[in-house]
C-alpha cells in the first residue's frame, strides 16, 4: 500500500492509512449505483479493504505495538488501539462472510470506515508522536521490518 518511500515506521503505517482511506472513498462513490458490475466492484473493493486492514493490523500488533510497550511508560493508548483492532477484525469477519453487497453490507463497510478514521486519528495524534519522542526506538529500522513482514503477509493472502 505504501506508495512513497517512508522515512520511518510511522510514515509507513500512515501511508497505509491514506491508501485504505482512498479505497473507502472509492467504495462510497459506488454506494448509490446499482447493477451487477457495481455490486461486483463493491465486493472486490471490500475484499481489498479487508485484506489491507488485516495485514496492517497484524504488522502493528506483531512489531509496532510491542516495541512501543517496551519503551512507553503509559501504554493505555496501545491497549485502546488493540481493542479498536479487535472491533475492526470482528466487522471484517462479518463483511468477508457475506455473499453479496446489499444494504447491510454497505452499512458494515461504512461503519468499518468510521472505525478506521477514528483509529487513524488516534495513531496520528497520540501514538506516532509518542513513538517519535521515544529515544530508545529505532523507527527507521522498524520501518524495514514492518515492510518485510507486510510483503510476506500480502503474499500469503493474495
Image (cartoon, rainbow, N blue to C red):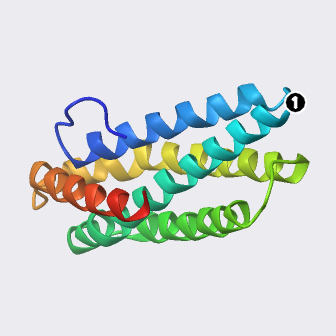
Indicate the quadrant where residue 1 lies.
Answer: top left
Q: In this rendering, does residue 155 appear at all? A: yes
Give left or right: position of 16 versus 104: left
Relative to 100, 88 lies left or right? left
Determine the residue positioned at 67% across, 52% down. 112
Residue in the image at 57% along x and 35% along y: 23
**Where is residue 40 drawn, in percent x and y?**
72, 41
68 to 15, vertically: above or below: below
**In terms of depth relative to the viewer, which is nearer, 107 or 102?**
102
Q: State the residue lying farthest toward the front.
A: 36
Check the image and report above or below for 42 versus 96. above
Q: Is residue 75 left or right of residue 94?
A: left
Of helix, strand and loop, which one carries label 1?
Answer: loop
Q: Position of residue 65 (x, y in %)?
A: 33, 67
Q: Which residue is mark 1?
A: 34
Q: Is residue 73 visible?
A: no
Number of numbered discs on residues: 1
Q: Nearer the viewer, residue 71 or 87?
A: 87
Residue drawn at (36%, 57%), measured in percent from left and top?
A: 154
- Which residue appears at 44% of the width and 63% of the height? 77
Taking 27 as reference, is 93 above or below it?
Answer: below
Quadrant housing residue 2: top left
> In the image, residue 27 lies at what x, y percent?
68, 34
User: Is 67 drawn above or below residue 15 in the view shown?
Assistant: below
Quadrant assignment for the C terminus: bottom left
Pointer 1 local density, CA inside 10 Å: few below 14, some 14–19, many at least 20: few
Amino acid at each position: 500500500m505504501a506508495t512513497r518511500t517512508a522515512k520511518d515506521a510511522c510514515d509507513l503505517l500512515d501511508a497505509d492509512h491514506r491508501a485504505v482511506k482512498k479505497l473507502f472513498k472509492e467504495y462510497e462513490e459506488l454506494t448509490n449505483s446499482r447493477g451487477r458490475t457495481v455490486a461486483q466492484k463493491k465486493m472486490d473493493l471490500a475484499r481489498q479493504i479487508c485484506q489491507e486492514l488485516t495485514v496492517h493490523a497484524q504488522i502493528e500488533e506483531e512489531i509496532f505495538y510491542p516495541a512501543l510497550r517496551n519503551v512507553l511508560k503509559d501504554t493505555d493508548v496501545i491497549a485502546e488501539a488493540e481493542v479498536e483492532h479487535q472491533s475492526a477484525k470482528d466487522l471484517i469477519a462479518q463483511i468477508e462472510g457475506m455473499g453479496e453487497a446489499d444494504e447491510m453490507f454497505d452499512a458494515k463497510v461504512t461503519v468499518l470506515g468510521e472505525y478506521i478514521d477514528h483509529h487513524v486519528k488516534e495513531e496520528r495524534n497520540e501514538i506516532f508522536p509518542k513513538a517519535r519522542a521515544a529515544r530508545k526506538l529505532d523507527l527507521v529500522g522498524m520501518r524495514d521490518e514492518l515492510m518485510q513482514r507486510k510483503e510476506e503477509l500480502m503474499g500469503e493472502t493474495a
